[in-house]
Amino acid sequence: MAKKPLEGLRVIELGQLIAGPFAGKMLAEFGAEVIKIEPPDGGDPLRKWRKLYKDTSLWWYVQARNKKSVTANLRLPEGQEIVRRLARDADVVIENFRPGTIEKWGLGYDELSRENPGLVMLRTSGFGQYGPYRDLAGFGAIGESMGGMRYVTGFPDRPPVRLNLSIGDSIAALHGVIGVLMALHHRAANGGKGQVVDVALYEAVFNMMESTLPEFDLFGITRERTGSNLTGIVPSNTYLTSDGHHVVIGANADSIFKRLMNAIGRRDLADDPGLADNAGRAQRADELDRVIGEWTGKNAVDHVLKVLAEAQVPSGKIYSIADIVADPQYQVRDMIREATLPDGATVRVPGVVPKLSETPGDLEWVGPALGEHTAEVLARIGYSDAEIAALRASKAI
């Protein structure tokens, strides 16, 4: 069996909940040994978030998969010493506490890198490690708001809305993974030392905001909420079918627009010189949306998608999770995996992204029990059975 691309990489995960642990999950899926440090009195709060199966969150089983759980009370000197010893031969430390927290515990980058100058530390926080907002509490929802994403999401006559997901945390985590891999490459290829990867949630979200800044700077345009369409890109919207489904149609390229109009019987619009480019179509967006909506409203979703597929017009039904589970594309690409829970029950969980042709990632085990790997890992870094027992007695682990 081919090795995974990150085999041999050792990661210490100090973070909790979403942003830091999501980054750790991705590294673990591609072969890194991710040792997750959890407080002994309950562990990561994510273990109890959302739907529980036999007292453990199903989200936990996904977010902590392929990781090893080691308990250590970071508020006690003995727990801090465990992390220092682990960090001596680690490649990466991940943390997402409020800036300054790990320094209070004697676990800041300066201290850990003194014994391990090649160490890379990923630090995700609401506002970054410096600046006037550094010490403010910042969750993903705040980052989505300050980064500009919430402002443009929703309908113009209603307050901004959110995705019913922790998208800001996940975006920050992905930026963190990219930063870690760049820092590791620099260390290996350029004879560099380790470094800190500083990811602020609001900055990661802001990085997704396309051309909103230069548009504001040069033209004074503030991009607003537009509901289901895409500002200035026409047609690109959501349309209702006769059987009550919503379909997204993206026909904003000139040639695709012509194919769409011909497919729905509007050759007059396909040949209209005023609609030959996006600038002209943007001026008549309401008219085009009405025409397309009238056509979809007279046809069932399967017919709509068939006609558009034959015309090579990008389109798709808006999927619920039930649609996702039933879809053959997800199944063929191994995006619906079956995992075994500790009691032997099976559950479907998301597959691994991205797909690497020669060294793919994989799901090896679901999120572990609290402290499942404590004895194994501590023994490996030199703790005796008696020392481990003493740590348990003092509630350091």
Image (tube, rainbow, N blue to C red):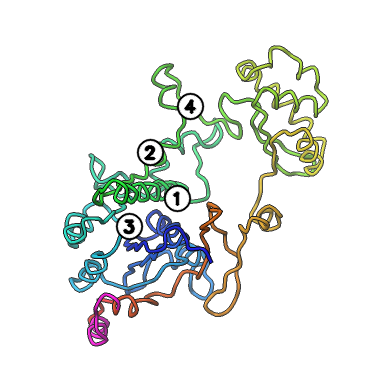
Residue under label 2: 146
Q: Is residue 191 left or right of residue 201?
A: left
Q: Amino acid at mark 1?
A: Ser
Q: Quadrant of residue 83?
A: bottom left
Q: Nearer the viewer, residue 104 or 110?
A: 110
**Circle 2 sits in a helix, a strand or a loop, which is it?**
helix
Residue 65: where, in percent of width, then height? 47, 66
In this picture, which residue range is highlighted in magenta? 380-393
Q: Amino acid at mark 3?
A: Ile
Q: Are marks 3 and 1 in contact (CB under 8 Å)?
A: no
The disc, 4 or 3, on the residue closer to the chain's N-terminal end is: 3
Give the spatial CA distance, label 3 vs label 2: 24 Å
The disc, 2 or 1, on the residue closer to the chain's N-terminal end is: 2
Give the spatial CA distance, label 4 vs label 3: 35 Å
Give the spatial CA distance, label 2 vs label 1: 16 Å
Q: Are marks 4 and 3 in contact (CB under 8 Å)?
A: no
Q: Amino acid at mark 4?
A: Arg
Residue under label 3: 94
> Which residue is painted at 32% across and 55% down in the image?
96
The disc, 3 or 1, on the residue closer to the chain's N-terminal end is: 3
Residue 191, placed above or below residue 113: above
Residue 19: where, in percent of width, then height? 39, 53
